[in-house]
Image (cartoon, rainbow, N blue to C red):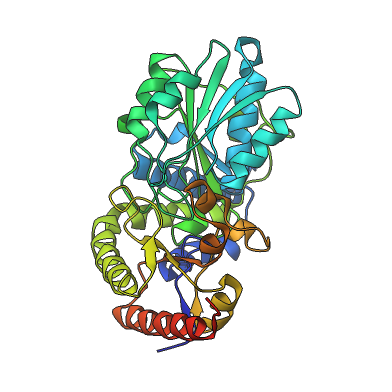
Amino acid sequence: MKLPIYLDNNATTPLDPRVLEAMMPYLTEHFGNAASRDHAFGWAAKEAVDFAREQVAALINSNPKEIIFTSGATESINLAIKGVFEMYASKGNHLITVNTEHKAVLDTCQHLEKMGVRVTYLEVNQAGLIDLNSLEAAITPETILLSVMYANNETGVIQPIREISAIARKYGILFMTDATQAVGKIPVDVETDLMDLMAFSGHKMYGPKGVGALYVRRKDPRVKISAQMDGGGHERGMRSGTLNVPGIVGLGKACELCRLEMASDTKRMKKLRDYLEAELLQIEESQRNGSKEHCLPHVTNIAFKYVEGEALMLGLKDLAVSSGSACTSASIEPSYVLKALGLSDDLAYASLRFGLSRFTTAEQIEYAISHVREVVGKQRQMSPQ
């Protein structure tokens, strides 16, 4: 068994070899620009992009024309939130989101606040879920957008998306969701879930980095957004820039594989996750962070009392896990997501996020359990508490 073992698949997933195989021709002989309409090189690139758009749309049950390709979920989120406010500014200047959102949403909201937009940040309960009554109470005549992530990147907690979208529809508010952790891992259906905009990324579902997509509903209602990048009118005027053809091909193939293999992948990963979680919770003074019932099948977040967080991470040299979001791992602050769930600073620091993938093996899980037990035990022996 090769060390270290990678269990940080919420940060990024390995590229599936079948995805790389699909991409390779577009990195070599099929190098044309998809916007070049006068020769075979451009036609081949456009055909590949069109096919990938269909593959992406099939995974989430949308129309291919509702898929806008971007550089990743962060750009998709910025395009959705800023694009909606620019387009619908005459209708209101209030946005509702959640205090456990990814920084891509929170930082975008804070940017808009500097421009006079009013933002309400809903709190979550100890399980990591929002209160639907509080959501409805926060709506005003000025509210034009509701942004709630589908599944949390640190805890895996899944929000009640259908109930949230029903509230948004009741008040005629657009609903955007950051579904970066959910798409490709659990069934996400834009017609059943009724979101109006949805952001997701390739590298979270065994595709390449640097490519993602934004779903923009075309009818009931028809959603309009202002472009945040100008120059050429690509992607139906919503996102200019030469398309990343190899990346888009990879995203399309990754979506196809997830659509075909999600059920079997989920069953296997959930079995391994449940075993990992059960074994680690047998360690004294450990606890699961966030709802177990409403959670992604491949994720668990566990806190270990009486362990110093930095020493814990340093001790786990043969295990790639995280104590928070990859986007904030350089910060010395405790996870704001875990703090929102009511954890103390010390407990938030001493929490580990485990994210499994379709490539995770039972042997790796056994090693992870043994390694964590050993390191936690040693740290507690050294602790003065």
Q: Position of residue 148 (x, y in %)?
A: 48, 35
- Residue 182 versus residue 59: which sits nearer the camera? 182
Q: Is residue 138 above or below residue 121?
A: above
Instruction: Tell me: 294 left or right of 330.
Output: left
User: Furthest-front residue in view?
Assistant: 385
Residue 34 visible at all: no
Q: Is residue 320 left or right of residue 151?
A: right
Q: Quadrant of residue 17?
A: bottom left
Q: Residue drawn 44% across and 26% down?
A: 134
Left or right, residue 362 beside residue 335 = left
In the rendering, at what x and y percent does residue 6 appear? Answer: 47, 75
Residue 191 vs 338, above or below: the answer is above
Could you say where residue 322 lies in the image, as x and y percent from the top left?
Answer: 53, 67
Q: Quadrant of the N terminus?
A: bottom left
Q: Is residue 223 above or below residue 191?
A: above
Look at 38% across and 15% down and name the residue there.
Answer: 170
Residue 16: where, in percent of width, then height?
A: 43, 67
Question: Which is more toward the observer, 161 or 257?
Answer: 161
Q: Nearer the viewer, residue 24 or 379?
A: 379
- Residue drawn at x 42%, y 45% is 128
Front-lying residue, 301 or 3: 301
Q: Is residue 235 visible?
A: yes
